[in-house]
Image (cartoon, coloured by chain):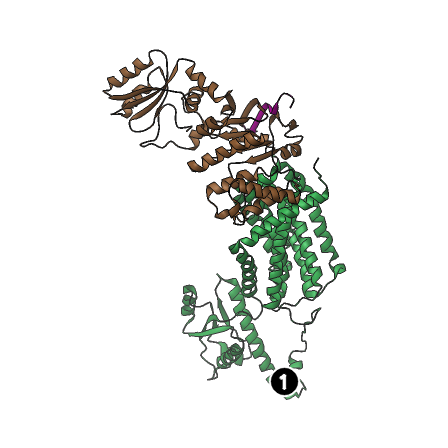
Chain colours: A brown, B green
Amino acid sequence: MDNGNIIEVKNLTKMFGKFTAVDDISFDVKKGEIFGLLGPNGAGKSTTLRMLSTLSRPTKGTATVGGYDTVKNDTEVRKLIGIVSEKMIIYNRLTARENLWFFGSLFNIPKDTLTKRIDELLELVQLTKWKNAQVGTFSTGMRQRMNVVRALLNMPQVLFLDEPTLGLDPQSSVEIRDFIKKLNQEQGTTVIITTHMMVDADLLCDRIAIVDHGKIIALDTSTNLKKIISGGDTMIIKLEIANLTPDLIASVKALKCADAVTQENSTRLHLIVHGEEAFDNIIDAVREKNGKITTMENLQPSLEDVFLHITGHEVRDSADQKIPMQQGPGRRFGGAPRRVR
Amino acid sequence: MIDMTAQTILQHSFRIAKKDLTELFRNRLGLVLLIVMPLFMMVMVGFIYPSNGTISNLQVGLVNENSGYNSVFASQSFITGLNQINNQTHMLVITNVNSTAELKDMVQRGQLEGGIVIPSNFSQSILSGEQGTIIIVSDESNPQISATIQAALSGVFNAMGQQLAIHNVLPLNATNPLAVVQPYSIQTQGVVSGHPSYFDFIAPGIMAMTVMMSVMTGLPVAISQEKEIGTMDGMMVAPINRLSILLGKTIAQTARGLIQGCIILALAIGIFGVAIQGSILLVFALLLLGVFSFVGLGIVVTSFTKDQETAQMLMMTLMFPMMFLGGVFFPIQQMPWYMQDISKILPLTYASDALRKVMVLGSGISQISTDLIILIVFGVVMIAIALPVFKRMMTR
């Protein structure tokens, strides 16, 4: 911990039978950092998080949290951490207070301290009014706030969040994000967050590890990750064509300079291209099919573009095999499928 | 360092048990079922089981082909006797049928459950000093009913034969003609006074079964359910011993089982008139011992099932043989020897046997010591197997 790292991961591997979910990854997380694991479903983010939070035993490699080995010193690690997982860890038939009391009592916190802390936490997420109502009657947003403060009962040094905004409406997502940010700034809590939401990663994380197929394929700050695109000869282009047809899309996709083509709506394409001739080539291809270009714009790269750029554009990730592509207006299709939003 | 002493483990497990029970008591439907399930079980098993004298209103056809002999109709007195006795027992509902062929047809149609045929030479046989033969047409698709008709008829014949014999020996001037005709009589005397009903037999068995099963089925379901909704992770990341989770869940399920056991006991005493001869404390001690002997098995099942559905199916598979081979509903002695051998390795057999001895026969601890020792040994062995298995499962 002298080097400022609160988490150190070395050659961590998890296999389920013959399937390698996490493939020999190594990284460090600095104390006080918000660290994001970004990737499609099935990339191995959650499994990594479960190993770090002592819930799963690594097949190979080691991980330490606060200097303690997650396997050999699991009890010490557990005292330092809190987890918010994709599945909410709250009991619907218990009231808000009872839920917090139950989980708090497992940490051997003295009674009066625990009482005080529960009141504070409920106040913090504006649930004081509902403290004696059964959690089953809450809205999803309220339940997720409960779920988050539940993880804070032991005042953890490290907070693990697994897809904390999944299934939440935009407003609740913003609330949760703000709360995490506040916690990190005021308490100095180190936060490890997994997400497949580019927005979450972009707005929250100090550093982001892009995970695909169990491997970390890029790790840097959001700004630096974007430089991978803006620094090279890759461009992001928004292309609006009044009479967009599948035939036209196919011919754009067939272009050598096009790395990824996604359809955003009935007239708009989103392209990742490279090379000096890219603009010309695209215009030629569209013209050849009698396409009418209404807008052509060079965009600032987003994390999503970075992701598409690095992972390549062939269909090869497990998320796509699990969720069949939906065709229709407003749905994207093309070289790089909808693996990230 | 966190204090991992037995006391902390117990404290944590009590909190988990309390949480589980709070959830249970807030589940209205679950609570109702908790009471209704044993009630159904008692009522159904208690009333449906064909015990002596309970069979009634069997649809039976009567064919009288008897043509008489020298204008004497011996069949007439038989029919009168049959009716007389049937009026007392109501075992049969007798319909007159014209011919044997018609009778068989009606049995095949399902209109009748069997038939009695008086052959044409009945009177002739009796009057010429031969045995009178009556033919029973039985429905082979239901051996139990055919056996019942035979039993009913043999009762009729017995009574008729007795009456005839008494009439025949009257001229001998015996003080008790019956003693001449039937010199031996049987009287049954139980170990305790009163006439135990079938309920007395099944109530202890059902109690033992419900309580023990609640742990064996409840534990895997409760744990796999928490794994499925994800709340198990919340307990797993707390710095508590894994044993606390297991123990807490076991305590909660035991409490649930004992509540059900008490309900069955109350129903048995209040509604079904079951009397408890032995010590009620011993009854509860036995139920707890039964739970203990099943915990290990429950943990093993828990460790091998990933989701609730599999857990439930596996439990059903294990439960059925136990229910029927454990001597809960039927006496073990009436099973073939190989089935008896299987039932001897099931802990439920010993628990229900011991409980029955205490409740019906008023046995004390020393009289059921064999059962107790087997239950304790079984429990200890199963837990010794279960704990390492469980530990491995928790850190998968």
Q: Chain of mark 1?
A: B
Dividing the picture into quadrants, the one containing residue A238 is: top left
What is the span of residues highlighted in magenta in the rendered image? A1-18
Q: Position of residue A157 (x, y in %)?
A: 60, 31
Q: Position of residue B224 (x, y in %)?
A: 56, 43
Main secondary structure of the magenta stretch: strand
Reading the image, the residue beneath label 1 is B169
In this image, B389 relative to A200: left or right?
A: right
Query: Which residue is rendered at x = 60% and y = 56% of the image?
Result: B210
In this rendering, the answer to whether A311 lies above or below B155 is above
In this rendering, the answer to whether B234 lies above or below B104 is above
Q: Residue furthest top?
A: A276
In this image, A261 relative to B210: left or right?
A: left
Dividing the picture into quadrants, the one containing residue B305 is: top right
Mark 1 is on which residue type?
Val
Q: Position of residue B363 (x, y in %)?
A: 73, 63
Other-residue count near label 1 (Cα within 10 Å), few / some / many at <14 / 14–19 / ≥20: some
Query: Which residue is rendered at x = 27% and y = 19% of the image?
Result: A286
Residue B355 in sight from this viewpoint: yes
